[in-house]
Image (cartoon, grey):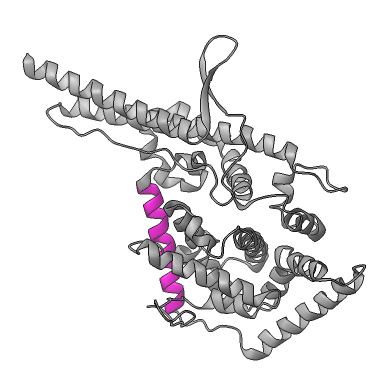
């Protein structure tokens, strides 16, 4: 009898601890608890702007997941509590997605719209078809921070998946962890369990290693020089169209070439099919099913996705470099550092944080050197760089 009461007490304490952990996560991430008109509890974003200029709110990531230990409880009771824990985890993630969306809508009201735009800025700035001038005005005028840009990007990713995922949560509930491995791309980032995140990273790095081992060479010097000449012509044409030459005008033209689709499109057009496939694998752009079937995705699918990713990275790099410090990578939280590295094709599993910061610092330094020419960007995409401590800039191809 005493053993049964003790097991029950331990189970209740464990459940209360996990509920408190999820609630603390939402509150720490800028998500507060309120009540609707009927008196039911709900979560909503607080009426405060994103204060951090580099790191997006923690609510854009998945809440902590602490599974209960079995202890002396029976197997059915243990499985029941594990299922309840997963159910609370997923609902906390969906609530965080809703709160993030409300905060992004408040951000939309602050960010000005371009004169010819009718859509919210969060969609325009991430759209490959957006006019270059709109992005340039937003970035050059300090109208958005890196943290806000990431909040916009993650809201666009997660919000598009909420309808389907919400139905799955309502149908399967605590059984959902048995379903999501077969459809990982329908899960919002706020609802990804640690094992799923680990699996996605392992798969991406395995594909990257296989692609580099296939021996695809970077474009030769003639194509690199042709890219530089094309970007030089674009630069002169845009500079001549500006009224009055100044340092700010040159910086604005560079921003337009880098963060618009000019550089990305010129670069992608000069890549052969094997090179396109290599970059797509390195950046984890196309799905694994293409590789498993032994079929290369068609170019009309790869090229737009690659232009979109390169443009996204260019905007993110520009906002990181614009941070009020000489070492913006040091301002990133550990998990944000891992995300920034994996988006750029840099391995993160089993690596110390200091090494990842060094790799990201090298990437940003090369981005500064490259400006709008494309030479260094090609080098970054076709080499797995390892920065040796004490000898900055030394590169070797990692196995």
Q: Is residue 10 left or right of residue 60?
A: left
Give residue 17's quadrant in the image. top left
Residue with the most extreme bottom position = 222
Residue with the most extreme front position = 325
Give residue 64's quadrant in the image. top left
In which quadrant will I find the N terminus?
top left
Residue drawn where x is 72% and y is 57% of the image? 128
Bounds of the magenta span? 195-213
Q: x and y percent of residue 105 in the render?
A: 68, 35
Q: x and y percent of residue 214 in the render?
A: 45, 79
Residue 277 seen in render? no
* Placement of 41 over or under 362, stated as above or below: above
The answer to which of 310 and 373 lies nearer the viewer is 373
Q: x and y percent of residue 136 in the render?
A: 77, 59
Residue 210 seen in render? yes
Residue drawn where x is 30% and y is 23% of the image? 16
Residue drawn where x is 60% and y is 84% of the image? 219
Main SS of the magenta part reads helix
The answer to which of 381 and 306 lies nearer the viewer is 381
């Amino acid at each position: 009898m005493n053993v049964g009461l003790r097991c029950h007490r331990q189970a209740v304490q464990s459940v209360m601890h996990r509920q408190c952990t999820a609630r603390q996560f939402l509150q720490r991430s800028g998500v507060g608890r309120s009540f609707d008109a009927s008196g039911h509890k709900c979560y909503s974003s607080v009426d405060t702007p994103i204060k951090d200029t580099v790191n997006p709110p923690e609510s854009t990531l998945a809440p902590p997941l602490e599974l209960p230990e079995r202890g002396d409880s029976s197997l059915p009771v243990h499985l029941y509590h594990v299922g309840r824990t997963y159910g609370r985890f997923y609902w906390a993630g969906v609530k965080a997605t809703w709160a993030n969306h409300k905060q992004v809508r408040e951000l939309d009201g602050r960010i000005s719209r371009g004169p010819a735009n009718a859509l919210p800025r969060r969609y325009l700035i991430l759209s490959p078809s957006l006019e270059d001038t709109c992005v340039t005005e937003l970035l050059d005028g300090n109208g958005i921070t890196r943290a806000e840009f990431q909040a916009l990007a993650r809201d666009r990713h997660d919000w598009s998946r909420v309808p389907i995922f919400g139905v799955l949560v309502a149908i399967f509930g605590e059984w959902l962890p048995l379903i999501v491995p077969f459809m990982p791309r329908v899960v919002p980032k706020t609802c990804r369990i640690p094992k799923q995140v680990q699996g996605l990273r392992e798969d991406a790095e395995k594909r990257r290693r296989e692609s580099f081992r296939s021996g695809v060479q970077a474009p030769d010097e003639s194509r690199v020089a042709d890219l530089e000449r094309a970007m030089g012509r674009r630069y002169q044409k845009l500079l001549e169209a500006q009224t009055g030459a100044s340092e700010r005008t040159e910086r604005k033209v560079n921003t337009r070439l880098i963060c618009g689709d000019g550089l990305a499109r010129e670069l992608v057009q000069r890549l052969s099919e094997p090179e396109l496939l290599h970059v797509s694998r390195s950046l984890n752009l196309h799905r694994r099913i293409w590789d498993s079937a032994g079929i290369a995705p068609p170019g009309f699918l790869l090229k737009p996705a690659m232009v979109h990713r390169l443009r996204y990275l260019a905007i993110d790099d520009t906002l990181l470099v614009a941070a009020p410090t000489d070492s913006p990578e040091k301002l990133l939280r550990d998990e944000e550092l891992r995300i920034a590295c994996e988006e750029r094709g840099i391995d993160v599993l089993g690596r110390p944080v200091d090494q990842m910061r060094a790799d990201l610092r090298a990437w940003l330094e090369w981005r500064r050197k490259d400006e709008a020419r494309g030479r260094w960007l090609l080098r970054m995409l076709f080499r797995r760089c390892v920065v040796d401590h004490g000898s900055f800039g030394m590169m070797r191809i990692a196995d």
